[in-house]
Image (cartoon, rainbow, N blue to C red):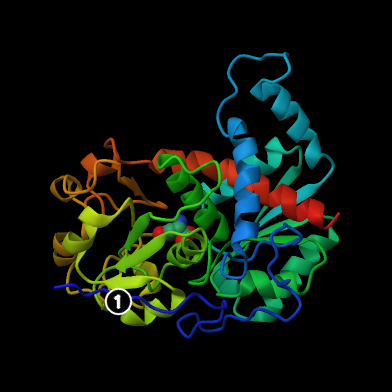
Amino acid sequence: MSTTSRGPAPTVASREDAPGLVVPAGVVPPPTDRWTSRHLLGLGTLSPGEIRAVLRRARELAPLSASLGPRDDNPDTPWALARREGQRLAGRVVANLFFEDSTRTRTSFTVAARRLGAEVVDLFVIASSVSKGETLIDTAKNVEATGVDALVVRARQAGAAALLADHVRCSVVNAGDGGHEHPTQGLLDAYTIAEAHGRLDAFDLAGLRVAIVGDIVASRVARSNIAGLTRLGAEVVCVGPPALAPRSLEVLGCRVSHDLDEVLPTVDAVMMLRIQFERHGTPAVAPLPGAAPKRSAAIASVREYRTFYGLSEERAERMKPSAVVIHPGPINRGIELDHAVADGPRSVVLRQVRHGVAVRMAALSMCVLASA
Ligand code: ASP
């Protein structure tokens, strides 16, 4: 029996399940079809035209998100493009201001900024010392006062990037704020799906259905994907047990199902999400120091979760021949995704990582140059 139903169109960024989310007035300009903003805070406040503008720019920059191979001085080669783009943010400084752990995203932003000729500084601020909004703001203002042109912000608090954008003059690019959004991940996922289905010309995803499977409630990646993919015309179905994929998500413009086996054969792409145990409160058993807890009151057991919602090789065989598997990482192999699928022919996980550089180059240059 179908457990799906359609919700209303997506609205604004404020959500009851993202407590503390504040988008200060004036920070988010009204959506247009051209890119005019000096900030990238989320996809939920952008128009389809603005999202496509970033994706088109990423497409131009795509040859730079791989090794350029042997040096070549001819025009019309990736080397010529690299020389041109390498001047675009020359003399500018991009600061990675990370209040929460990240390797993949921070590395990708660093490579992107350097490809554009910017200098990059890395700042890690231990999350536990940041308990008040004032501390975040003070830190950002102090970093900005050293003369940086853009802050790439990752924080535990939903709304943190927008809050900082309201208090600094430089660009702010959201690299993940609590359970709210991770807009560059949403953009690179849309790019990867468009590539897999031959939609890079117009980034029109009409007619495609995408399933997002797993811990939707805790996932900023899911929120950015729901906003981005639906604006580009795709249909999004969130799948998971009721505690991780509650029906209330439909207010974001997606459908909700609790039956992966029913949804899987119908989709053109499936995004598998890990269970974010660290965002599910105190575990019943204390983990070893430094290790992420592997228990959540939202599921009966990891084994049961895997039985119903893990993408095994056998399940993946029931997907459409053209359907692809994506994952924002880090992958919990053997839980939401089996080795054979993660490394198999449907997996475009490394394409996602690759496109992340082009998308972040596009976002950084468009934001910094909009504020120039
Ligand atoms: N890397 C993603 C994020 O920062 C997804 C995850 O952590 O599971 O939200």
* Residue 187 versus residue 172 in the image, above or below: above
2 sits to left or right of 239: left
Q: Residues within 10 Å of mark 1 (few under 14, many from 20)?
A: few
* Residue 158 versus residue 355 in the image, above or below: below
Q: Report the front residue among 368 and 44.
A: 44
Q: Report the front residue among 55 and 242.
A: 55
Let me know if residue 335 appears in the view: no
266 sits to left or right of 55: left
Tell me which residue sits at (48%, 86%) in the image: 16
Tell me where residue 29 sits by quadrant. Answer: bottom right
35 sits to left or right of 111: right
Q: Report the front residue among 70 and 370.
A: 370
The residue beneath circle 1 is: 5
135 sits to left or right of 286: right
Let me know if residue 326 appears in the view: yes
Q: How many marks?
A: 1
Tell me which residue sits at (42%, 67%) in the image: 219
Horizontal and vertical percent for residue 330? 39, 52
Query: What amino acid type should be assigned to the residue bearing mark 1?
Result: Ser
The N terminus lies in which quarter of the figure? bottom left
* Residue 225 versus residue 312 in the image, above or below: below
Tell me where residue 50 sits by quadrant. Answer: bottom right
Tell me which residue sits at (21%, 51%) in the image: 334
